[in-house]
Image (cartoon, rainbow, N blue to C red):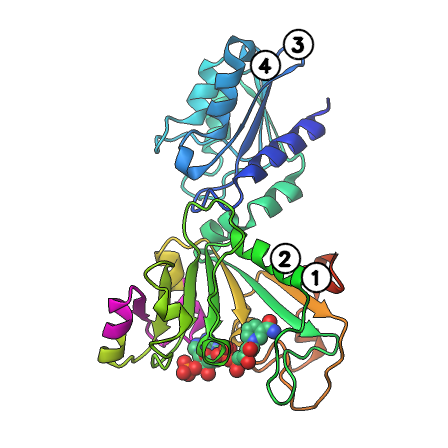
Amino acid sequence: MTDEALTSRALELASEGIGRVSPSPLVGCVIVSAEGQIVGEGSYIFSEVTHAEIAALRQAGERSRGGTAYVSLEPHAHHGRTPPCTEVLINAGIRRVVCPIEDPNPLVSGKGFEELRNAGVEVVTGILREAAEKQNEKFICWHRNKRPFVHLKTAMSLDGKTATVSGDSKWITSVEARAEGQKLRYEYDAILVGAQTIAADDPSLTDRTGGPRDRGLLRVVLDSRLRTAAGSAVVATADEHPTLFIARDPEPEKAETFRSKGAEVAVVEGGPRDTKAVLGELYRRRITSVLVEGGASVAGSFADSGLVDKFTFFIAPVVIGGAKAPTSVGGEGADRLAEAFRLKDITVQQAGPDLMVTGYPA
Ligand SMILES: NC(=O)c1ccc[n+]([C@@H]2O[C@H](COP(=O)([O-])OP(=O)(O)OC[C@H]3O[C@@H](n4cnc5c(N)ncnc54)[C@H](OP(=O)(O)O)[C@@H]3O)[C@@H](O)[C@H]2O)c1
C-alpha cells in the first residue's frame, strides 16, 4: 500500500474519535512492519486516555521494530496524561514516521518531529495535509485563534426564508434534514442561540443522536438581561444538560433562579452582543467548537464580525415569499457584493427532499 493510502487509513481511524476527544485532537495511527504488513492500528478517545500511537504499538508488539508509523497528527514530545508518544515510537524501534501535519499548539508544534529526527527516525510530512487539517479544524482553530471554531447552521426555504410573515416556521425542512442537523450537534462542544429563539420555539437544544459523548453538549443562550422564562425547556432541564446563559446586566434574582435550576450565568464585558467576548468566555471554558443555530439576529452578528469558520444551509424545496418574512442571516450584512461571504470547498448533500450545502468563507 502507498504512503497516501496508509495515511488515509490513519485519518479514517482518527475519525472514530469524533465527538469523543475534545478538547484534544482526533488522532489515528497505523503501524506497518519492515515487511510491509499492517501490524497495529489505534484511535484516540479522550476517556480511554491511551494515545492512538500507543494503542497501535501495543497491537504490533515486536513486529513494530524497523517499521513505519502513519500518524494523522504530529506525535507529542511532552509528558501529559501519557508518556511522550515520540519516546514510545523511538523505543519501539520505528524507523520512519509519515504524518501529514504538525501539532497546531504553538507550545509543542514541530517539537515531536524534531525529537524523532534527532533519534534518527525518518519523518515524512505533508501527505494529505488538507484532509488532515480539515479533520482537526476545530482543534486547530482553538489553538491558532484562541477561540472556538464557529459553524453557522441554518434551515431555510429556497427563497432564503426561515418562517412565514405570521411566524409559522415548523417545519420548513424534512425529518432527514433535521437528523443531519442532529449529527452536526454530535460533533460540537456547544450549541448557541439567541434569547428570541428560546422565546419563540422553546427548543430543548439537545444532542439526540444517542452517540457516545465525553462531554455533554453545552447549550449557550445569548440573553443580555435574562429575559428567558424560568419555565422554558432549557432552564427546566439545566440540571440534566449543561446550560450557560451569557448576559450583560442580569437581574440578580433571575440569575439566582437560573443557577438554582442548574444553569450557569456568565456576565461578559460588552454583553453577549460582543461576539468576540462571547467566544472568549467559551474559550476560557475549554470549548473548542460551537454550532450557532440562530436565529437570524445572532447569525447576523457572528457573520458581521467575521467570526464564522464554516456555514451549513439546509435548503427546503419550498418558496415562502413575503418581503417581511424573516431570512436566515440578519445583522448589517455586506454593503457591497465584494464584501459578502463567498464560500469555497462547497459540499452539497441531499437530505430527503432538502439540500445540505456546506462551505468555508473564502
Ligand atoms: N430556520 C432556522 O434555522 C432557525 C434557527 C433558529 C431560530 N429560528 C427562528 O428565528 C427566530 C428568532 O430569531 P431572531 O433573529 O428574532 O432572534 P435570535 O437571534 O434568536 O435572538 C435575538 C436576541 O438575542 C439577544 N442577543 C444577545 N446577544 C446577541 C447577539 N450577539 N446578536 C444578536 N442577538 C443577541 C438579543 O436579545 P437581548 O438584547 O435581550 O439580549 C436579541 O434580541 C425564531 O422565530 C426562530 O423560530 C430559525
Quadrant location of the N terminus? top right
Q: Up-down: is 272 above or below 123?
A: below
Residue 146 in the image: x percent, y percent?
A: 43, 55
First in residue order: circle 2 vs circle 4: 4
Q: Position of residue 350 (x, y in %)?
A: 75, 58
Q: Which residues are magenta?
A: 256-279
Q: Nearer the viewer, residue 239 or 144?
A: 239
Residue 80 percent location from the top left of the image: 35, 33
Residue at label 3? 35
Residue 180: mark in rendering: 2
Cα–Cα span, label 1 and label 2: 9 Å
Of the residues shown, which amino acid type is indicated by label 3? Glu
The answer to whether the residues at label 2 and label 4 have Cβ atoms under 8 Å apart is no
Disc 2 versus disc 4: nearer the observer: 2
Local secondary structure at mark 1? strand
Q: Nearer the viewer, mark 1 or mark 2?
A: 2
Q: Nearer the viewer, mark 1 or mark 4?
A: 1
Callout 1 environment at 10 Å: few (<14), some (14 to 19), or many (20+)?
Answer: many
